[in-house]
Amino acid sequence: MGTEEIKNALDISNWQSELAYDRWIALPVFGLRPPARYKHAAAAVDEKLYIVGGIRNGRYLSDVQVFDLKSFSWSNLNLKPNADKFKDTGSLEILPATSSHIVIKWGNKLLIIGGHSKKVSDEMTVLFIDLETHLCGVMETSGKVPVARGGHSATLIGSRVIVFGGEDRSRRLLNDAHVLDLETMTWSLVEAMQTPPAPRFDHTAAVHADRYLLIFGGCSHSIFFNDLHVLDLQTMEWSQPQFQGDLVTARAGHSGISIDENWYIVGGGDNKSGCPETLVLNMSKLVWSVLTSVKQRDPLASEGLSVCSALIDGEKFLVAFGGYNGKYSNEVFVMKPKPSGSSLPKIFQSPAAAAAAASVTAAYAITKAENFYFPKAEDSSSKGTGNILSEQGVRNDIEAIREEKKVSELSLAEVRAENTRIRGQIDEKNGTHSELSKELLSVQGQLVAERSRCFKLEAQITELQKMLESMQSIENDVQALRRQKSDFERDVEVDSAVQRQGSGGVWRWIAGGTGNA
């Protein structure tokens, strides 16, 4: 059933109870809709969806739109400048037009962290919107303030916000991490060990067990990623754990939200096509699965959309808005996620504790568990305190650890087989490299010989050119001699003619004289 069919069949008065689990529906809207957009930011507070800024037709937006999830109506939030903390730039805009930013709820405020804006700033700015007074202004921060950026991630952990990656004003890609302490509004740089994710923007981030920061997807200026990276916030080590489950395509511009141990990923694309599947990652087991799919041109298969978690009548829902996949969207979609059962958490291993140590760790855990002392309960009133583990529960844990050990040993065997295969490929490549090196040396020798022959030919050509120049001079001399010869012969002929004429006159005089006598 498509989203439009479900929308038409929706009972407005009791729509929450009618929703099937893990299915998106488009909510009806009463009244005017806000301008469609993408690369905005969103937050759900008290059964209302707040949409801040974004882009439409290449223009940054500076409005704050509010969708009431009970009445299905939109309204515009009229902001007021905060005289103490709002920096006057001479613009009539109270909230700077911004895109590719992050909005986080903190107390009774929405914090707008970073983003691209026409307002020039070398450092990342933090704005606030007071949801009670509607005041808007700049939060003054101190410490090692990160460079201004957009397309980053900002994740709330307790009273701290962790910012990762993004793209600065010069389109330089970033993979640094910073922490903003919301109690003191002080920035600090995260100095982590091991290999961090490649520089990227338009990725997503989530936190698991208040300890692990997960980074998924995103893109550079030419590559789209489908990798998963984890930063252990206690050991400050980056790792790239192996995950299982369904194949995950590379994407950027997607949106994500975590509920309990599940991390929901919606939309995104690769500038060619959108991603129609809604993914869920079980962060305890590191297993990907496709929750549902929509049509290729559906707004939920867009880049630059937003997804929030909203509490409606005590029940959690996913709420999606906006995006772009050939056209801009201003639809509101909701999904009721199926409640997940409890499961044993999976330890995120740092690179130092690689797969080879997994079986040893599991065996050690089994030995320790089997030596546990199980105290007997003195009376029934002591049951349910949660301070003493039952013997059966520990045995279940032991069995689970044994199963984990088996899986680790299988993974270790696979890793060893893969290492053997890679070594074979390396040896083959080394052999090929040796042969190519020999061919290269041979070609270089031939090249030296050819260069020597070229030098000789150039010398011969120079000599021939000199000979040609001298031959030209000789040719000129020959031509001059020929002209001289021609002139000489002409003079001789003239002299001969004159002499012949002179000789004829004498004989005529002699002959004439004789006749007269």
Image (tube, rainbow, N blue to C red):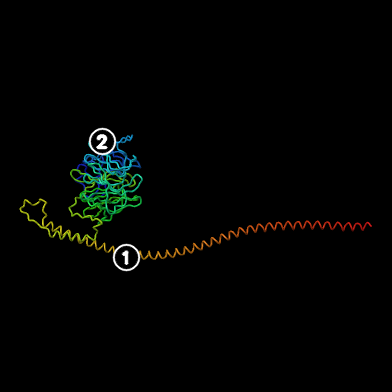
Judging depth in this view, the residue of 492 and 260 nearest the camera is 492
- Label 2 Cα neighbours within 10 Å, binned few <14 / some 14-19 / many ≥20: some
Question: Viewed as shown, does residue 443 lie left or right of 411?
Answer: right
Q: Residue at x 33, y 35 (%)?
A: 89
Which quadrant: the C terminus?
A: bottom right
Q: Earlier in the sequence, mark 1 or mark 2?
A: 2
- How far apart are the alpha carbons under marks 1 and 2? 66 Å
Looking at the picture, which amino acid does disc 1 mark?
Gly
**Residue 279 in the image, given as x and y percentages of width and height:** 26, 52
Label 2: which secondary element: strand
Tell me the SS state at disc 1. Answer: helix
Which residue is the site of mark 2? 135
Percent of width and height locating residue 257: 24, 48
Q: Is residue 215 above or below residue 370?
A: above
Q: What amino acid is at disc 2? A: Leu
- Residue 234's tag is none
Q: Residues within 10 Å of mark 1 (few under 14, many from 20)?
A: few
Q: Quadrant of residue 344?
A: bottom left
Q: Position of residue 301 (x, y in %)?
A: 30, 49
Residue identified by numbered label 1: 424
